[in-house]
Amino acid sequence: MSVKQWKQVITISVILIIVLLLILTIFFALRVHNYQKDVESGKLVNLAQFGELDAKELSGLFKYLGSVEADSNLEYQTLFPDLYIDNDFNFIPTDEKIAYLTFDDGPNADNTPVVLDTLKKYNVKATFFVVYQDTPTANALYKRIVDEGHTIAVHTASHEYTKIYESVESYLTDFEKMASHIEAVTGTKPEIFRFPGGSINSYNAGIYREIIAEMTRRGYVYYDWNVSSGDAASGYISRTRIANNVLNGSASQDDAIVLMHDGPGHGETAAALPQIIEGLKKQGYIFQGLDNTVTPWCFGY
Ligand code: ZN
């Protein structure tokens, strides 16, 4: 080709690249825009669909969502004026392999102390998505979770699916009961939560979009999981099987948010924990509690 032809090829290539970048920019801007509109109308938030956004873009989006004012046309948005987190939303990307061990449905007098002892022995921080109990034993365990440097987070007060997923108001009422109890007992205001049954389940099918939109507007972040221990399946599940489920699941991940339970009947999970921690270490993982620097892991819909 002549010099002139080369110049033409280069010019056309540059123009094509610019047009492509422009299209991509507009595409992402429109998606963000629609997302914001949907949150304002209390309609839709699908955090998983923003998997393509990097941590900084996602933080900015969440900051915006957390600044949307309550709309008096949506009565639930005006309920519980203290149920807000002044969240700085600063998701920080990391190259390290991090395992976030999470325990749902506790505290439990038999299992939670065993879990806490093991975590202490290995110097591992984890996250507890707790349920409501106002007893001296439970209150001492909520406190111990916080005192030992773990993340305490809201699961639900009642864990009764039909009740909490009846309406956004019901969900907020249940959530407020748990969040204010944690704060009263431990002095820590919880900032993150996990939906009973996961963010999408057969009980909340008609309503989860509105609940997610409202909770995000109030500054809270939720976490589903990408590794399941399978410890909530029906029937007896041995500690070996629980540990194998976790280690098989985590082997293919870069970051592992591991679902486990420390509620009643989960003695085998507590017993499996040393094997799980040692196995994850061998896979190259380090351990952290969840906090608002961790990019949310959410089921897509
Ligand atoms: Zn649960």
Image (cartoon, rainbow, N blue to C red):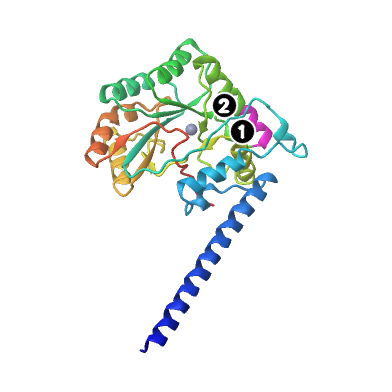
Which residue is at the far right? 73
Where is residue 14? Give x, y as percent: 46, 73
Instruction: Mark 1 or mark 2: name the one nearer the start of the chain.
Output: 2
Q: Are discs 1 and 2 less than 8 Å apart at CB?
A: yes
Label 1 CB sits under 8 Å from any ligand 1 atom: no
Q: Against 59, is 139 above or below? A: above
* Quadrant in the rendering for residue 164: top right
Q: Main secondary structure of the magenta part?
A: helix
- Quadrant placement of the N terminus: bottom left
For disc 1, the neighbor class at 10 Å (few under 14, some 14 to 19, many from 20) is many
* Mark linked to residue 103: none
Residue type at mark 2 is Ser
Where is residue 244? Give x, y as percent: 28, 41
Front residue of this view, candidates 245 and 83: 83
Q: Secondary structure at mark 1?
A: helix
Q: Residue at x 51, y 33 (%)?
A: 193
Which residue is at the far front? 3
Residue type at mark 1 is Ile
The residue pinned by badge 2 equals: 158
Q: Residue at x 63, y 27 (%)?
A: 83
Where is residue 189? Give x, y as percent: 53, 23
* Quadrant in the rendering for residue 6: bottom left
Front residue of this view, candidates 14 and 122: 14
* Mark linked to residue 164: 1
Q: Give the residues in magenta.
A: 166-174
Q: Is residue 226 something one can see in this rendering?
A: yes
Instruction: Tell me: 290 left or right of 42.
Output: left
Where is residue 175? Give x, y as percent: 59, 28
Q: Residue at x 60, y 23 (%)?
A: 177
Cα–Cα span, label 1 and label 2: 8 Å
Front residue of this view, candidates 201 and 283: 283
Q: Is residue 200 something one can see in this rendering?
A: no
